[in-house]
Each structure stands twice: as structure tokens, then as C-alpha cells.
Image (tube, rainbow, N blue to C red):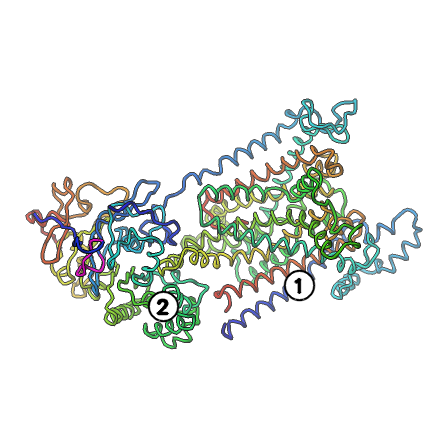
Amino acid sequence: MGEAASQGVVARLISRAVQSVFVVFVAASLTFLLLQLAPGDPISAIADASNVPTEVRAQWRAQQGFDQPVATQYVRWIGNVARGQLGHSTSQQRPVRAVIADRLPNTLLLMGLALGASLLFGASLGAWQATRTGSAADRAVSFTSLVLYSVPEFWFALMLLFVFSYWIPVLPATGMIDVAMHGSMSSGARLWDRLRHLVLPWTALTVMGTAIFARYQRVAMRDALSEQFVRTARAKGLTTWSVYWHAFRTALLPTITLAGLFFPALLTGAVFVERVFGWPGMGSALLTAINSRDYALVSASVIVGSAMTALGSLFADVLRALADPRLRRV
Amino acid sequence: MTVSRPLVKTDPAAPNGWAPNDPLLAVQSLRVTFDTTRGLARAVDGVSFTIAAGETVCVVGESGCGKSVAALSLLRLIPAPGRIESGSEIHFDGMNLLTLNEEALRSVRGRRMSMIFQEPMTALNPVLTVGEQIAEVVRVHTKASRREAWAQAVSMLREVGIADPDVRATEYPHQLSGGMRQRVMIAMALVLEPRLVIADEPTTALDVTIQAQILELLRAQRDRTGLALLLITHDLGVVAEMASRVLVMYAGQIVEEAPVGALFATATHPYTEGLLAAVPRLDQIGGRLRTIPGTVPAATDWPTGCRFRARCPHAFARCETDAPELVQVGPSHRARCHLVQEPSHRKAITP
Amino acid sequence: MTTPVRVPDLSGASLASLSGEMRSMSPVVSSRQRRWRVPFLFIVLLATVAVFAPALAPYSPDIPANYDAIQNLAPSRAHPFGTDGLGRDVLSRVLFASRISLSLAFASVLLSLVLGTSYGAIAGLVGGGIDRWLMRGLDVALSIPRLLLLLAVTAFWENLPLTALIMLLGTTGWFDVARLVRGEVQRLAQQDFVTAARATGVRGARMLRVHVLPHLVPLLIVNATLSVAATIALEAGLSYLGLGVQPPTPSWGNIMAEGSGGMASQWWLSVFPGMATVIAVLACHALGDALRDRFALDQVPA
């Protein structure tokens, strides 16, 4: 890569990073706006309970700064977000930051493993389909992908749970680990325990993801195979597999972009799957927060989710620029 | 009445019926069809020709006449739903190309017979450097190491006239100009010094000045390595510059074949005459451009009798009932036209 | 002597690449062009069921079917989908829920289309700096995950009425339409026929209406169909979490929510509404895909 080319990549990275920061800013502002417009305020749940005296309510509100003018509150809010002070979670009785530090890694683990597997299986499946366009196998896989893509994620998760935890009880129903026994297990048994708990939620997310990537990759691969350079490759005497590999490399480019843009979908899936399987991640924390009107945690989730999405597309953009030489200069 | 004879000499003593004096490439009764919703399209309908070692043969014709399809079929690159019909024969350098297995065919492609395509921007892989693409040909067919293959690629780039080849080799197709890309394609096709190179309209997508350079390059390479060249074009200027022999195709068939001088001087088939007349001449003042009226019929529906008759100024009764065969006009000169035997029906063309 | 040589598939050339010779005769896979009929039929069927739900449902969806308080019955001849915790017939509820889920999806998608098309068309036609900023705004909007936003709003405002829900879904779902429309409008604006029209004096509103918009229709139809599918699924999810359609109004999602407590013991509350959702979403997806093929749009699946 020449000098000018790598500058292109760096410039992209910087502009995307700036955009990500802006996204976080907008997300924070949006949540602030929603909180202002919504009935009640972040501490209504506890402050407006009937057993709290009026003066104490006023006092708490003053403490939190909720009696200040809107503009001041806004500036304070943005400042806090910038410093990572996302408030206090009433549903978990600890700072939001601590909740995120605790729960987010679990969600990322699940999402990361699911994304990786979906990409791997989906891209391979889609590419394989494209080498047999129109065949019975291709059509069968396409139809299956379509059906899986159409099943609501939470329902699929429910069915998985039903089949594998109740009907044929082989896998645990909830949690990340067997809370009772985990402490006293050997490290090998611990790993096994973790894996057993991981399987169902991971399967739910991966099956969906694979269906999506397979559909996408199939079209991209088919397009790539009909490109002229594939004919040239054949004319050069390359083996069929070599030719497919060349086409696959080109077809991966749009799929990489899709993978980066896949975060919102993955987050959505994670929320439902965590709920169904009791996986202790950000998704289930969010849902609990909603039920107990823990507005601080809800707002923080929106902000964190947006940040992750922005970073995801940044990552995809950079990866794409590295993989596709045509994009490097710009 | 001369009847066309089989072009491949069969020597019972030689394996595959092949004898050492035989032409490098011999195509016999090539038929390529495509299964389309509108019926069976006979893109190439009984084409036979030979190319001797070191010869340059040009195939001329309008779009739709089947010349590209014929060329692709030599390397068996016809896409589904097309297929080469049984009864076709393609013999190259002692091998029967149509019965080769995939492995053997692969070793022919790019190494003993290679192809240059029309649009180099799309024919080159956009995510690989041009050096890698040329080196790939070398590595696939020989035991050369990566370094050796790369060195060969660079020297080939130099050979085709690209300045600073070691720098250029690390660039991607989109970074090069159209002319340079075509040189790269030529480098790729020639790096292993094949015996036959098929060039499918190699200059059509280029500017006129670049065209001349590319043709010059092809000529120089031909002289250097003694390769045979099958050049497909619709441009008679290219034919005049490059060919030793010309095949004129129309509606999936060869309608005239002649040495280049004879073709320009004594074209016999009305289609060839029409093509030559349609070329505007600098010494013609005023007047209208001569065109051939009508259009090529659809390949699913070739007319009975002579396929050119609807557009032919000399058509007569026999043209509708009898499909003409290739008949001798002069030394190595044949035409598919009843006028050869019945010249009285040739009408005077008013300019 | 020579046997017919079946040339290997996918030799890397396509009919289109044979420099025009065979392009006009590429075997249009005509069966592919008719693929939209079956899904379309399904959707018409679903819509009919939804419209005629009151006539088709054997019982009322709200009132317990039987004053003997037959609760949590497994599927039987009297109650093919069983009954729920309040003794209501699940089949009837599922049928009535189809009205809610489908109409909600259609309405919100319609809203999204209007918003997205306006935004995208303006951006595409105006071009230049304004277009760039509008697109940047869109990028930022797309970075905020839709579900999180929906969850936040439904959390802060509890018990949203149906119309509010429709507004919410509609105003959060127009971003990708806008991007598509802007891309298409830009592409169209550069076409020669637009320049030709402009050269004859056509301008502004007429240009938009007569020359540009008709080309957008296939794109919008495909997008709308796929959006409806996504919205049905999204609403089902929200209702399942208790944040979408509120009981006692039946929605496929909230029926499943009732069933989530006793998964093993009341499987019919989870299975039947779920299957209904799957069928609806599947039909819409299949239709969207088929229409995309039919209109020969070159998009990779959204």
C-alpha cells in the first residue's frame, strides 16, 4: 500500500471516529429530550411513592438538580455522559457504570460469538449455494433461510427453550452458570458448565444471523461469479476452486459491510434472547430497568447501544477499505 | 461443382488421426447452441476452419454473428445454458479439445492457448495487483516459486511496453489507464508463450491512438514468439493491418474465407462487399454512406435457404430454396453464395 | 465419434458478458417471474381473515367463552387453540389479534413511506451540501438502534394507545426508505430522459410527479412489503415484552406473553400465535423477495 493509500484509510478512521462521538452526543441529547417530555422524571419511581413526604421529594429533586432550568440540566447531563457518569440505577441499587461494567461483557460475549459464527456459516453457505444456483439443494436452503429469517427471534428462542429444556431436558433453561454448583466445580467442569449454558442462546442468535448472511452472500457471490474477471481466471487455467475463491473474495466485500451494520439487529436479538434464557447481560438488565422505571439505566442503554452501533460501522468501514483497494484512495 | 472437403487430414498411422504437417488448430463443424425461452438459438452453426502455426487469422462480422461464441468455445468457456453440440470437432496441437478432461483442459488454458478479452477493466480482478494476476498464470502452470513468478511478471510487463514495470506491477487495475490495462491483459496471455492466442476485439474499447499501439504490440509479440493469432474484430482496418487470412461470419456461419489481399481485392460474397462498401473513404466526396439494409435475423430463427437473402441485393429464386455451401472462388478463397456458380444473377449496384 | 460435451457449469462467463450477442436472448427464468403469486395469495388470505375475524371467530375474544370458567384448557374440538388463563378462546383471540397486528403494521409502514420518500426525494433532487447534511443526519439516526429507542419511549410513557404506537413505529422506521429513495432519485436525475424533459421546459412538481416518481414505485412497493414483515415481527416482540399492544386488546405478541409463564403447561398460548406471526411475516418476506425479482431491482436483500 502506498503512502497515499494508507492515508486514505487513516482519514476515514478519523472521520468515522468523529461521527461516532457525534452519534453518542445525539443519543444522549435524545434521551434527555425524551426524559423531559415524558411524564414524571428519573426518580419518580421512588420519589413519588405515597409514603414519601412532600418536602423530602423536593429535597431529593433539588439534590439531583431536577429543579434547575432545562438548559442547565442539559449541560450537566452532557457533561456527565462525557465523563462516563451515567447516573444511579434504582433497579440495581448501584451506579449505572457498575451495571454496565458487570453486564455488558456478558452481552458482548454472546453477541460476539454469534456474529462470528453467523458470518462463518452464513458466508460459506451462501457462497456454496451460489455455486449451485437453481439446483434442488440451493432452493431448499434458500427456502429454509427465508423461513428462519421470518421467525421472530424471541419465538424461536422460546421454542428452543421448550424443546431442549423441557421436552428433552438436556440443557439448562436459564443463566450463564449453574449458580449453586459452579463455585465447587473443577476448571474443566466449569468450562463445560459455561458452554452448556451458552449453547441455547448462542444457537438462537446464530441461526438467525446465518440465515441473513447466507441470503446476502448468495446474491453477492452470484454477482461476483458473473463478473468478467471470473471468465478471465478460467481462461488462465485456474482450477474451479481457485476461481470460486477469487469470486468469494470479491463477494465478501459487501458482506463485511453488512456485518458492521449488523449491530442493531444483533442488539435487538440479544435483548429478547437474554430475556428468554435469563442471560445476565445488558438486555435483561434493560428490561428489568423498564419494569421498575429505572430511567437512568434505560437512558444509559440507549447511549451505550448507539455507541456500539457507531463503532460497528466504523470497524466495518475500515475493514472494507483495507480489503478493497478501490476504496483506499478516496 | 466443388464441394467443401474435410479440413483435417486423417493419418491412420498417427494417434488421434493427427499428422505432423497438420494445422495447429482445426475446427470442424462447430455447432454451439443456447437453450433460451424463445427456443434453441444456434449461435454457431457449422463452422470449420484451420489455423496454421504462426498464422494470423481474423474473424470479421457484426454483433450477433457468433464470432465471440465460436472463440469462447475453443477454450470451452461457453456459459450454461449454451453447449457445444455433438458432431463438433476441435483439434489443437495434437489434442482433441472436446474430449479432454477438466485437468488436461486446464493445462491448455493460459499456457498453450490463451485469450485476450475486450474490456480489460472488467476482465481483470479489481482486488489483486496486476503483477499478482500475471504471476498467478505462471505459478498455476509451472513450478516457479512466488519470487520467480513475480520476476517473470515484471519482465513481461516490460516486454509489453509498460514503463517502470516493477512499480506498476504493484498497482491495481483501477489505477491504470485503459491502454495499460489492455497491455496487462496481453502480458497475462503471453507470459507462458502459448502457441495460439485468441484476441476478442482487443482494441474496440480503446481510443484510436491506443488501438494502433496495441496492434503494434501484438504484431511485435507475434514476430518474437511465432504465435498464431486468432483476432476477432468488426473493424476492417484492423483486418487489413494484421491478418494473413480472413474469415467473414454471418448468422452463425462462415460466409467467406480468403487471404487478406484477395478479400479486399476480390470479395465475392455480397455481405463482404457490403462491409467493404460501408467503410467511408477519404477520396469519396459527398454522396451517402453505403449501408447494408435490414438487420441480422434472430439466432432462434435462421431463415431457410441463404441466411443473407433478405438483405442481399442480388438474391434470386434459388437463394430461397437452397442453402449455399462454401464453394471455391480462387486459391484458398471460398464463399458461401450461389452467385459463384451462377454469376449471371449478379446485378449492377447503383452507387 | 464425439459425445455431446456438457460444458461445465459456471465457466465464469455469463450470457450478459457475451458482448451483446446473446444478451437479448438470456433465458428469462419465467417461473421466477411468477413467484410472487403464492405469497400474494397468502397475504390476501390473511387480510381477508383479519377483516372477517368477527364472522370467523367462534367465540368472542374478550368474554370468557364459558361461564363455567373453563380456564387453561388444552386444544380440543370446542376450542381448537385452547383457552387462556381467563377462560377466553385462544383461536378467537388469535383471529382478532390478526386485525391489530396487520393494521398496525400497514399503517406505520405507510407513515414511514411518506416520511422517508419526502426526505429522500428532497435530498436527492436538491443535491449538493444540503444533501450531504441530510444524509449525515440519516447516518446518525440509523446509528441509534430502533428497538432501544422504542423500548425507551415505551418505558417512559407507559401504556401507549394504539395510535401512539403506530406513530412511534412510523417515525422510527423511515430511515432506510429515505436512503433508498435518495439514491434512486439521484440516479434518475442523471438520466438522459430527465435532462431531455428539462430541456423542453418541464420543471419542479411536474418533473417530480410525471418523470421521477413513477420509477420509484417498484422500489417503494418492495420496501413496503419487507417493512411490513419487519414491523409485524417488531410489534410482536414489543407486545411480548409487555410494551406494545396492551391487554385486553389481543395481539399475537401479548398472547405469547401470557403463555411465557407456563411454557410447559400452556404451550398452546405460545405456539399458535407464534405460528400465525411466522406465517404472516414469511408471506410478506416471500412476496417482497419475489417482487424484487419481478421488478428486476438490483438490490442485495435488505
Residue B248: within the magenta? no
Question: Which residue is found at the position 29% from the left and 59% from the top?
Answer: B200
Q: Disc 1 is attached to a residue of which chain?
A: A
> Which residue is located at x 48 percent, y 46 percent?
C214
Q: Pointer 2: what residue? A: B184
Question: Alpha-carbon distance for marks 2 and 1?
Answer: 46 Å
Q: Is residue B24 magenta?
A: yes
Q: Is residue B200 left or right of residue A275?
A: left
Residue depth check, mark 2 versus mark 1: number of the one nearer the observer:
2
Q: Which residues are magenta?
A: B16-25
Residue A96 vertical placement versus C287 (above, below): below
Please, which residue is most extreme toward the bottom here? B164
Of A20 and C141, the residue lying toward us:
A20
Q: Nearer the viewer, residue C208 or B20?
A: B20
Q: Quadrant of the C terminus of chain B?
A: bottom left
Q: Magenta: predominant secondary structure element? A: loop
Residue C263 coordinates in the image, percent (x, y): 73, 37
Read off the chain for label 2: B
Element type where label 1 sits in the image: helix
According to the picture, the residue beneath numbered tag 1 turns out to be: A22
Number of numbered labels in the structure image: 2
Q: Position of residue C66 (x, y in %)?
A: 76, 23
B350 vs C48: above or below:
below
Apparent side of residue C12 relative to residue A73 in the rendered image (left or right): left
Residue count near mark 1 (Cα–Cα under 10 Å), binned few <14, some 14–19, many ≥20: some
Label 2 SS: helix
Tell which residue pokes out farthest to the front in this image: B13
Q: Amino acid at mark 1?
A: Phe
Same chain assignment for discs 2 and 1: no
Pinpoint residue C108: horizontal percent, then vertical percent. Answer: 63, 43
